[in-house]
Image (cartoon, helix red, strand yellow):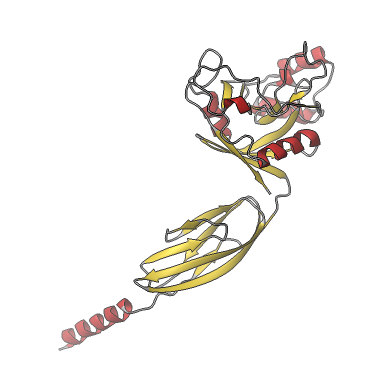
């Protein structure tokens, strides 16, 4: 008799559970953050079989518990809809994303994402890069020159849909940017700098209007820095010397090319691109495309 009652009770509970209406509920890891921000969403819903997340920026997910990356400032209404058959229930919460304190860009490649900061100390290069990136100028262009232990270079508009073996590196928007040589900005690993033509045709060392390179670099020792100081007639600060000795770079380019940014994440992506198979002109044998987004 007791066993029969327990069975009936269990069946009643199961029937009650199966008849529960979906109830959406979730929490967010933060409700106010600075771009770029990755927010974790924890699903606490009950009585649902499937879910639909709407993140307020036009993107969605059907994962049970998920995360989302916000790259632009704004107020976003995040919705979670809990679904069971034809029954639904929705919960909405808002998240505020502030503009980044620094000027940031996101370079998406076939190997992953490189996040970088552009310096306020080089306003002409910064503003020109932001203008071009905002126009989609770089989207679909290639990293057309890569040298392991040195750098990866891109930004040539002629590289879009360029046939294999076509020489690249001479394209641009039709203008140059005046050089901005700032003593505190040097070619430590991850530095972003402007490509340019040689001193023989460009004695003012003006920068390409669009082409840039990211320093992968190689190990640096004190003797190398001493020699550069003697040859070029300037002194590195103790902090710059320590950074070069720890991270490496290409110090022989200092004061000759305009450094205007630095990588803050995605160094492994730079390394992977630098090491791809390439032809005799240092162009990757398989295209490495990029898109660039300004983080605002």
**Looking at this view, is 171 or 221 the one in front?**
171
**Above or below 144: residue 32:** below
Residue 280 in the image, given as x and y percentages of width and height: 53, 12
Q: Quadrant of the N terminus?
A: bottom left
Q: Is residue 87 left or right of residue 281?
A: left
In the image, what residue occupies the spot 65% across and 23% down? 171
Point out residue 278 in the picture as x, y percentages from the top left corner. Answer: 50, 18
Q: Is residue 187 above or below residue 89?
A: above
Mark yes or no: residue 246 visible: yes
Residue that extends furthest to the left in the rendered view of this protein: 1
Which residue does the image show at 71% across and 34% down from the upper left?
261
Residue at horizontal 72%, vertical 28%? 209
Work out which residue is located at the far right of the displayed protein and give it: 233
The quarter of the picture where residue 139 lies is: top right
Q: Is residue 199 left or right of residue 1?
A: right
Q: Is residue 154 visible?
A: no
Left or right: residue 284 compared with residue 212: left
The total of numbered circles placed on residues is 0
Q: Is 164 in front, or is 222?
A: 164
Q: Is residue 240 above or below residue 282?
A: below
Residue 132 location, quadrant = top right
Residue at the location (73% across, 45% down)? 102
Residue 19 in percent (x, y) is at: 32, 79
- The front one of 207 and 183 is 207
Provide residue 157's location: percent of width, then percent of height: 62, 28
Relative vertical location of residue 10 with respect to residue 235 in this rendering, above or below: below
Instruction: Looking at this view, name the residue that lies furthest to the bottom.
Output: 1
């Amino acid at each position: 008799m007791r066993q029969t009652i327990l069975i009936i009770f269990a069946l009643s509970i199961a029937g009650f559970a199966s008849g529960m209406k979906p109830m959406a509920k979730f929490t967010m890891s933060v409700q106010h953050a600075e771009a770029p921000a990755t927010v974790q969403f924890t699903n606490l819903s009950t009585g649902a079989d499937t879910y639909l997340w709407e993140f307020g920026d036009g993107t969605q997910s059907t994962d049970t518990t998920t995360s989302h990356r916000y790259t632009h400032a704004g107020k976003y209404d995040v919705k979670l809809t809990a679904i069971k058959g034809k029954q639904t229930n929705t919960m909405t919460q808002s998240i505020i994303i502030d503009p980044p304190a620094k000027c940031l860009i996101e370079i998406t490649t076939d190997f992953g994402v490189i996040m970088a900061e552009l310096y306020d100390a080089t306003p002409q290069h910064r503003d020109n890069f932001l203008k071009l990136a905002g126009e989609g100028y770089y989207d679909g262009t290639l990293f057309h020159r890569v040298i392991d232990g040195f750098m990866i270079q891109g930004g040539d508009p002629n590289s879009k849909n360029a046939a294999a073996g076509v020489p690249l590196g001479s394209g641009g928007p039709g203008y140059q940017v005046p050089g901005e040589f700032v003593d505190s900005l040097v070619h430590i690993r991850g530095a972003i700098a402007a490509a340019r033509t040689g001193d023989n045709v460009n004695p003012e060392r003006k920068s390409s209007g669009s082409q840039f390179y990211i320093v992968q670099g190689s190990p640096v020792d004190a003797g190398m820095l001493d020699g550069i100081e003697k040859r070029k007639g300037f002194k590195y600060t103790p902090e710059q010397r320590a950074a070069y000795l720890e991270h490496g770079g290409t110090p022989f380019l200092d004061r000759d090319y305009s450094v205007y940014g630095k990588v803050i994440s995605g160094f492994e992506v730079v390394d992977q691109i630098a090491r791809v198979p390439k032809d005799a002109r240092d162009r990757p044998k398989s295209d490495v495309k990029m898109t660039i987004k300004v983080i605002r």
